Image (cartoon, coloured by chain):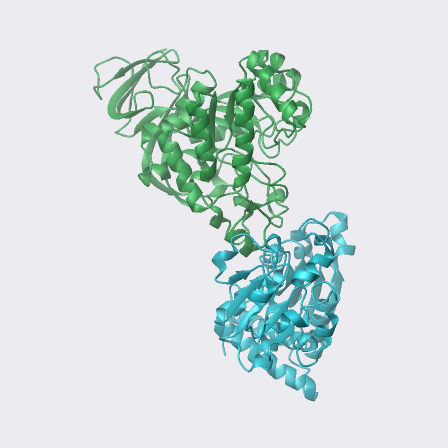
Amino acid sequence: MTFRARHLLGIEHLHPTEITTLLDLADKYADQTRNGTVDKTVLAGMTQINMFFENSTRTQASFEIAGKRLGADVMNMAMQASSIKKGETLIDTALTLNAMHPDLLVVRHPNSGAVDLLAQKVNGAVLNAGDGRHEHPTQALLDALTIRRAKGRLHRLSIAICGDIAHSRVARSNIMLLGKMENRVRLIGPPTLMPSGIGEFGVEVFDNMEEGLKDVDVVMMLRLQKERMDGGFIPSEREYFHRYGLDAAKLAHAKPDAIVMHPGPMNRGVEIDGNIADDINRSVIQTQVEMGVAVRMAAMDLLAQNLRASRQAEVMA
Amino acid sequence: MTDIIFTNARLIDPVGQTDSLGALRIRDGLIAAVYEDPTPDVAGTIINCAGNCLAPGIVDIGVKVSEPGERHKESFRSAGRAAAAGGVTTIVTRPDTLPAIDTPETLEFVARRAATDAPVRVLPMAALTKDRAGREMTEIGFLQDAGAVAFTDCDRVVTGTKVFSRALTYAKSLDALVIAHVQDPNLSDGAAVTSGKFASLRGLPGVSPMAERMALDRDIALLEMTGARYHADQITTARALPALERAKRNGLKITAGVGVHHLTLNEMDVADYRTFFKLKPPLRSEDDRIAVVQAVADGLIDVISSMHTPQDEESKRLPFEEAASGAVGLETLLPAALRLYHAEMITLPRLFAALSLNPSRLLGLDTGRLREGHPADLVWFDPDAPFQLDRATLKSKSKNTPFDGARMQGVVLGTWVGGALVGGDV
């Protein structure tokens, strides 16, 4: 087993074997959770702090449950309500928290790179729960696990990611992960929502859903933020749904057994038709949520192992 | 005062574009004679240059000294010492202070502080519009009388074309030089890096390099209208170069500069959100960098400057988007520029045309020349001596250099301003 990272800041710096190691462990945790056989002592004695500088219910709850299932002491800090308002800098907040000796720090921040910056200043292991438009590694890992369980493999699949790629950290992490595992990645969306230089990412880019979805194994929809809907990036919500919303007619271009994914929360009738989202034969959206907890359990377990090992090495030295 | 004779000097003459061994004599603050013989038989104090370079001192346009307002970042004393250590004999200061230098009174304050504290020559620039707000022009005439050598709103673009065209027209009547930042402010709004693969990979908001050409195109049209004397502070993209070339060919009074960081670094250097590499305009692609270096070598871009911008640790230790822009550069300007020489992309006389002669000419100064009768503003340096930069050793109060830990070549051995030694260990 190999997983050497000290922090989980992004997919970019993970090796494919590290990804596989993490997914294997998460797979085990998913089964154990279903059977009720999870070992509650894995993170016993570890303190996990969830620092969310940006609103989140689902991700925060997922990390909290993951920590608690493995026996960690979990604390949530709503950072928007606290020191930031008082003008404290990110570094000072990090140093203050560090003095309390947390073992696992789960951080979400609205600025790209902010979690990297914080990780440089603390002794514990940092998990990036989303930084700006940069990365959201646990989301990509839970998507990967969901795909692997549904398709039986995580390579040589054709996967379409659709919607607001430009502002999506989920898309970035997924492009990197799926690329590293040797899949064909297609991006579909209006050109105003495509990041610059996307042609150099080793992906195929489409601005037409029918063409882009042709014969894909997996359809990943992205959430369209409300603030992008009015004229700035796309003309209107209804035109967007007409051209890029996933409905049965568009999905018919994908393989008959293609699965449909969405990181949530969904805008029904904007990027996805409610009937598709609820179709138990196609939609794996609920499985994604379930795998989210398992992947976060695995990530924290592996980082905690590395943390214990490095502390032991320090004691020896 | 006895003469000083520099013997065995590798004389870098940007006027004659020569690089040859010789000697040089100074008297009463001026260059008294230049000799082809490296050891002429004349009386005076001898400084044996031992084959190292002797060049006209650097004239650095666009230095931010944070007085008034933010003296903890940089003062005239610290900036002056940094300049002397870096071979910069004239600093041309920016008016983007707190408050902005937009009245003769604030300009006089700056001139007074500079005269008592800085060991090098300090020439102040003044704001083009009041409070650099782009609405009303400053008292260009009074400011000129008080010593302002150029007028600029620094990194703020005068968006109103009517305001800018009037300011240019008025400046023309006084033959005042206007320096502008060329970056379309709307397109570049909120950007932290140049758009492209790197920006997308890092999830940072980017601006298309086209924003530079758009702003330059607009300004060129206004120059055709007004005939003013104009300098673009930093041309950093390949796409802006043909427009610049055409404007020059059409006889407009236009010149252009570039910061040394854009000649020696590219966008990839930002790596994992290193905020010391956050500049304005942002660092560009490698293709742009090469094109701009070539433009300096060809003489299309006239001036290289440090764009010295001191920032304290607090304003840099933030998430990349929120961190302040700019880097200090007075002490690293020469060794950074010498990277282009060592890469065989530019000759030393060419380099010193851009560092010393052209900025002097642009501002109507008689410095920047290794010729008899001109001021003895000189820099003596070993172009090859290697060192590793430790930012703690910088004389600037702010240490925000992108070259911390970098291996560089080129050590200043001595800096003279008006014949007086101000830096180095001679």
Whole-percent x, y for residue B342 in the image: 32, 39
Quarter where residue A267 is shown: bottom right
Quarter where residue A31 is shown: bottom right
Shown colour of chain B:
green
- Residue B399 visible in rendering: no
Furthest residue toward right: A81
**Which one is nearer the viewer's eye here, A176 or B417?**
A176
Q: In which quarter of the image is the N terminus of chain B?
A: top left
Furthest residue toward front: A249
Quarter where residue B165 is shown: top right
- Residue A41 visible in rendering: yes
Q: Quadrant of the C terminus of chain B?
A: top left
Chain shown in cyan = A
The residue depicted at 51 percent of the width and 63 percent of the height is: A204
**Which one is nearer the viewer's eye here, A192 or B233?**
A192
Whole-percent x, y for residue A149 in the image: 59, 81
Image position of B51 with respect to A74: above or below: above
Whole-percent x, y for residue B88 in the image: 44, 27
The residue depicted at 56 percent of the width and 75 percent of the height is: A217
